[in-house]
Amino acid sequence: MKGRNYRRPEGMPYVRREYIDAIPGLRIAKFTMGNLTSGYDYILRLISEANVQVRQNALEAARVAANKVIEKIGEDNYFLRLVPFPHVILRENKMIATAGADRLSEGMRRAFGKPIGLAARIEPNDPVLEIYVKGEYLDKAKEAMRIAKSKLPMKTKLEIIQAKKATS
């Protein structure tokens, strides 16, 4: 099983959980990390440039990689958020791979398959990862995003937005 087999979203996403007995569990530990306050100067967004289906393993790897870099500035100085939720159920019809299987390898046409994982469908210009950070830690946040985008199976762009200060 390879991730590239499931990268292109083809057809309708399968999300009906009531027809499947054993759905694989969610492997993403947390969707938000850090401290959410209104005192941040910048919002960094990792934006997708392709229509793609991303497996939950890749999303978790990107989150862990970004958090590993950004947590060095202190937990009160950033807020990291993983935006997409993997809800599409991936199924695979496993073929026979033993000796003499060359005659049987076609299998049933359009077989339902067993659930093997979860994925999130991401369209162009959808945010994947967001980091809210103070001005003095902007370079560290850029480095975290650079490392996180190497874990994702699509081209991405980094968008830096100046956060609006709340006036009271």
Image: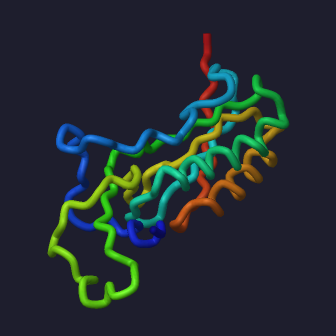
Left or right side of 98 for 127? right
Residue located 67% across and 45% down the image:
64
Residue located 15% across and 75% down the image:
109
Residue located 57% across and 52% down the image:
46
* Colouring method of the image: rainbow
Left or right side of 90 for 12? left
At which x and y percent is residue 164?
60, 30
Q: Pick the residue in front: 14 or 108.
A: 108
What is the quadrant of the N terminus in the image?
bottom left
- Can you tell which quarter of the image residue 5 is in? bottom left
At which x and y percent is residue 114?
29, 56
Q: Pick the residue in front: 130 or 148.
A: 148
What is the quadrant of the C terminus in the image?
top right
Left or right side of 19 for 36? right
Looking at this view, name the residue that lies furthest to the left.
Answer: 109
At which x and y percent is residue 11?
21, 64
- Can you tell which quarter of the image residue 121 is in? bottom left
| Count of all numbered marks drawn on residues in the image | 0
Name above or below for residue 99 compared with residue 146. below
Residue located 53% across and 66% down the image:
153
Q: Pick the residue in front: 20 or 101.
A: 101
Looking at this view, name the residue that lies furthest to the top.
Answer: 168
At which x and y percent is residue 70?
76, 40
Left or right side of 150 for 8? left
Name above or below for residue 127 compared with residue 133. below
Q: Pick the residue in front: 118 or 129.
A: 118
